[in-house]
């Protein structure tokens, strides 16, 4: 389905949505049936919403750590070191796709302080997940004496696992009962506002733990981490502090509207709640990372639809996978 036909399809649903933004490259996936690159604004009191318009991969996304050449050089010295590093990386990341006994991600349930009620396993929760070492060639230096340099990134793409699945089940059940978003997301509702906050963090925490496991497997230790404040009491789990962290399939209430309006991003990045900008169509082909002209990746971009100035010039950095890509199709 092309952007034009996809937009025409949503025009028929204008009574259900406040507005729809069909972005360049928008389509409906033949594999999953989900919309891609479509942003919806939905009135909070609207009912008769279709569960099929919402992806089960709630708040899935991409986290990126920038590495130094000193970190990566020992791993790429020769074929033997590459093969050994790849094997270590593969062994470090569990996958629901490979092992039926693996259950990835935290529970949606939490205690009074929004902490986990049980320990959980990080890992791949969908076929599109990956963890891998990627490289790019960037122009660096002051004006007039710029040089091309190899730069390296550890990239993790994954979702929230059990929490996202449970949230989706309760969310769709509520829609099937004819409830509006305001009814579903109110405090004390089902799934409720606390569950939305919980699932919004689950994917980020899963990726953060995977990045910690990946750098340990690769023998890289000069990486900043932070304690997982939402983990079960007494836990020593830590999260990597990523250079870039973006979320897709997000749902949030817009604060600057006169009435209750919710925004849902279908298969596209919600830049307002993300740290940086990155996109990909296929992890095995690489990612596109956006930076400022000075190379800063920690950018906040608000486009015209969000009533903000677009006064920042962005550069595209094409990040391509090295042989150490631990992608599911290569692994299994």
Image (cartoon, rainbow, N blue to C red):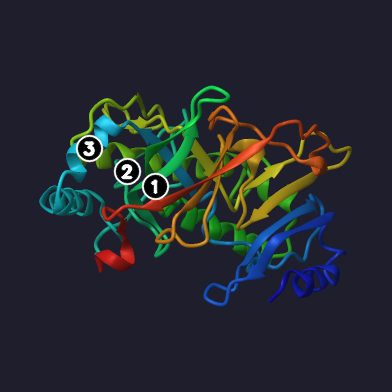
Towards the viewer: 166 or 80: 80
Q: Residue at x 36, y 55 (%)?
A: 130
* Disc with the residue nearer the chain's start (1 vs 3): 3
Do the CB atoms of the residues marked 1 and 2 lie less than 8 Å apart? Answer: yes
Towards the viewer: 53 or 208: 208
- Distance of mark 1 from mark 3, alpha carbons? 20 Å
User: Where is residue 292 shown, x and y percent of the image?
Assistant: 60, 32
Looking at the rendered image, the quarter that the C terminus falls into is bottom left
Do the CB atoms of the residues marked 1 and 3 lie less than 8 Å apart? Answer: no
Q: Is residue 178 left or right of residue 281?
A: right
- Distance of mark 1 from mark 2, alpha carbons? 7 Å
- Distance of mark 2 from mark 3, alpha carbons? 22 Å
Tag 2, which secondary structure? helix
Viewer can see residue 160: no
Q: Residue at x 42, y 62 (%)?
A: 128
Discs 1/2, front: 1
The residue tagged 1 is 156
Discs 2/3, front: 3
Q: Is residue 313 left or right of residue 327?
A: right
Q: Is residue 309 left or right of residue 97?
A: right
User: Where is residue 179 shown, x and y percent of the image?
Assistant: 73, 59
The circle on residue 210 is 2
Say few, some or many: other residues with alpha carbon within 10 Å of mark 3 (under 14 / 14 to 19 / 20 or more).
few
* Disc with the residue nearer the chain's start (2 vs 3): 3
Viewer can see residue 168: yes
Tag 1, which secondary structure? strand
The circle on residue 73 is 3
């Amino acid at each position: 389905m092309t952007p034009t036909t996809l937009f025409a399809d949503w025009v028929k649903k204008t009574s259900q949505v406040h507005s729809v933004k069909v972005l360049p490259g928008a389509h409906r996936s033949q594999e999953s049936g989900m919309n891609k690159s479509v942003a919806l604004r939905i009135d909070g009191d609207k009912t008769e919403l279709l569960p099929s318009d919402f992806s089960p991969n709630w708040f899935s996304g991409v986290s990126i750590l920038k590495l130094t050449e000193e970190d990566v050089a020992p791993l790429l010295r020769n074929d033997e070191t590459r093969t050994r590093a790849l094997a270590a990386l593969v062994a470090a990341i569990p996958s629901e796709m490979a092992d039926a006994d693996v259950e990835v991600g935290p529970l949606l349930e939490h205690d009074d302080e929004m902490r986990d009620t049980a320990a959980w396993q990080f890992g791949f929760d969908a076929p599109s997940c990956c963890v891998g070492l990627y490289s790019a060639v960037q122009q660096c230096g002051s004006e007039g004496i710029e040089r091309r340099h190899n730069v390296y990134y550890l990239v993790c793409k994954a979702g929230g696992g059990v929490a996202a699945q449970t949230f989706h089940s309760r969310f769709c059940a509520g829609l099937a009962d004819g409830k509006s978003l305001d009814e579903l997301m109110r405090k004390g509702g089902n799934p409720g506002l606390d569950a939305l906050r919980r699932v919004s963090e689950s994917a980020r925490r899963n990726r953060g733990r995977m990045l910690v496991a990946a750098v340990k497997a690769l023998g890289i230790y000069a990486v900043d981490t932070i304690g997982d404040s939402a983990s079960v009491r007494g836990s020593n789990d830590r999260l990597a502090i990523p250079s870039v962290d973006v979320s897709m399939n997000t749902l949030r209430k817009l604060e600057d509207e006169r009435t209750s309006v919710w925004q849902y991003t279908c298969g596209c990045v919600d830049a307002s709640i993300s740290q940086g900008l990155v996109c990909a169509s296929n992890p095995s082909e690489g990612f596109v990372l956006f930076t400022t002209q000075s190379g800063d990746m920690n950018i906040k971009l608000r486009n015209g639809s969000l009533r903000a100035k677009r006064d920042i010039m962005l550069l595209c950095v094409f990040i391509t996978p090295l042989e150490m890509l631990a992608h599911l199709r290569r692994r299994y």
